[in-house]
């Protein structure tokens, strides 16, 4: 019998911690990772081997070299997405680094497969330098049909997405921005329909001027909302502030048509919609000051900006980012179908029209079942991904970015 190897630095506390991890169901599920690569063709004998690898593979390589578009038909490129992060803005955990981000990236990859039938590969990069991230992804891009940027901190995420899309002819999509915005718009459309109002009649206030807040504000304006104001930690984003980043300065020029200034709480007075993507808190009196029949989408995780029980006292529709309350604003409702549709038609990019089509399709899934506790479908509703996929593919063709 081999002698037991003892770590001289190990303590009783270490032993207790390992024991605790062994019995924690989250750690049990994650042991060994949550995904693996498997072959889609058999290798049973030398004939299979000669086709899957040398010499047969040489014919395929030569054909692709002569006609590069064949790579979509004879490799996995047309059905696989790179899930790219630098680990700087992971969930509500913040800048925890690339290794610690991997469980989330693996999770994202299996959601792509489970809900959209799209294969995805997690890539956690060992750099936070904007130029290095861009150059790395550009060099990896020939292997993939799309790039999903994930958990990259603002404001770098805006530049990284923009510059990558300029250099690549495959879709580049920052889900923290656009996925959140798409699902939010879908829920808001249905909340408005439920209460007999149009988007153009609504004034919204967003708490949080990071990736999600900026994207939601721009997307709601694109969709025709009456007005939207955005607040960061220092108050409302407005042109009279001298401390704005370039991104917030642009946002100030697009939003807040009412020219409100001051605090988030003051802006909520008479507002029709509150959208929280900040992780902060909103006091009950501020929610109580909103217009009758207001909508409260308090989406911070795990603790919403205002507790749903409090929000329900004043709002006609309440949504959160949590799965244990109705109306969960969950990005998994959007990104698998969006990429499935884009890959299906070999789109070169994901346009505003494709995103609007995704939001409308997602809202339409609810249909006649619409109710205050059901303005957005469940992630497990099997109608969601096919509806979003079809809508995105059709929009890509209509907008001229489809290549098949």
Image (cartoon, rainbow, N blue to C red):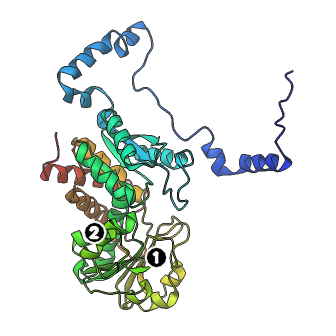
* Residue 288 point in image, percent of width and height: 46, 91
Residue 166 placement, left or right of 208: left
Residue 6 placement, left or right of 146: right
* Residue 303 point in image, percent of width and height: 55, 71
Q: Residue at x 56, y 53 (%)?
A: 96
Note whether residue 4 is visible. yes
Farthest residue in the front direction?
242
* Residue 26 point in image, percent of width and height: 63, 51
Q: In this picture, is 140 found above or below 51?
A: below
Q: Residue at x 15, y 49 (%)?
A: 397
Nearest to the observer: residue 185 or residue 266: 266
Q: CA distance from mark 2 to mark 1?
A: 19 Å
Query: What SS does tag 1 mark?
Result: loop
Per the image, the residue denoted by label 1 is 233
Q: In this picture, is 5 found above or below 178?
A: above
Q: Residues within 10 Å of mark 1 (few under 14, many from 20)?
A: few
The disc at residue 218 is: 2
Note whether residue 366 is visible. no
- Number of labels in the image equals 2
Q: In this picture, is 316 found above or below 38?
A: below
Of circles 2 and 1, which is in front? 1
Q: Residues within 10 Å of mark 2 (few under 14, many from 20)?
A: some
Q: In this picture, is 67 found above or below 99?
A: above
Q: Residue at x 66, y 50 (%)?
A: 25
Q: Residue at x 38, y 85 (%)?
A: 294
Nearest to the observer: residue 111 or residue 256: 256
The disc at residue 97 is: none
Q: Of label 2 and label 1, which has the lower sequence position?
A: 2
Is the C-beta separation of discs 2 and 1 under 8 Å? no
* Residue 168 point in image, percent of width and height: 25, 42
Q: Quadrant of the C terminus?
A: top left
Task: Report which quarter residue 67 is drawn in.
Answer: top left
């Amino acid at each position: 019998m081999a002698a037991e190897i003892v770590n001289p630095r190990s303590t009783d506390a270490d032993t207790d911690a390992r024991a605790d991890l062994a019995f924690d169901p989250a750690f049990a599920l994650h042991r060994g990772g949550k995904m693996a690569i498997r072959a889609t063709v058999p290798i049973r004998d030398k004939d299979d081997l000669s086709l899957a690898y040398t010499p047969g593979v040489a014919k395929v390589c030569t054909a692709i070299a002569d006609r590069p578009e064949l790579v979509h038909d004879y490799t996995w490129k047309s059905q696989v997405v790179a899930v790219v992060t630098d680990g700087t803005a992971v969930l509500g955990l913040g800048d925890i680094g690339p290794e610690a981000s991997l469980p989330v990236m693996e999770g994202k990859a299996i959601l792509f497969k489970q809900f959209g039938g799209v294969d995805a590969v997690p890539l956690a990069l060992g750099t936070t330098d904007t130029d290095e991230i861009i150059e790395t992804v550009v060099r990896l891009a020939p292997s993939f049909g799309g790039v999903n940027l994930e958990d990259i901190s603002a404001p770098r995420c805006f530049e990284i997405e923009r510059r990558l899309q300029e250099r690549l002819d495959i879709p580049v999509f920052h889900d923290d921005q656009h996925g959140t915005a798409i699902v939010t718009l879908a829920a808001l459309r249905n909340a408005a329909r439920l209460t007999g109002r149009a988007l153009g009649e609504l004034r919204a206030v967003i708490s949080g001027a990071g990736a999600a807040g900026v994207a939601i504000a721009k997307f709601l304006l694109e969709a025709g909302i009456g007005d939207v104001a955005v607040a960061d930690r220092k108050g409302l984003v407005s042109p009279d502030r001298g401390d704005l980043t370039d991104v917030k300065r642009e946002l100030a020029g697009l939003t807040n048509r009412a020219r409100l200034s001051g605090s988030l709480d003051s802006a909520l007075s008479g507002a029709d919609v509150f959208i929280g993507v900040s992780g902060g808190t909103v006091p009950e009196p501020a929610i109580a000051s909103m217009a009758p029949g207001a909508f409260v989408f308090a989406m911070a995780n795990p603790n919403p900006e205002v507790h749903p029980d409090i929000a329900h006292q004043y709002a006609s529709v309440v949504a959160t980012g949590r799965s244990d309350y109705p109306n969960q604003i969950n990005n998994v409702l959007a990104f698998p179908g969006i990429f499935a549709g884009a890959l299906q038609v070999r789109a070169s990019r994901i346009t505003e029209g494709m995103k609007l089509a995704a939001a409308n399709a997602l809202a339409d899934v609810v249909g006649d079942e619409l109710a205050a506790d059901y303005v957005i479908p469940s992630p497990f509703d099997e109608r969601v991904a096919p509806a979003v996929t079809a809508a995105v593919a059709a929009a890509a063709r209509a907008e001229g970015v489809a290549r098949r």
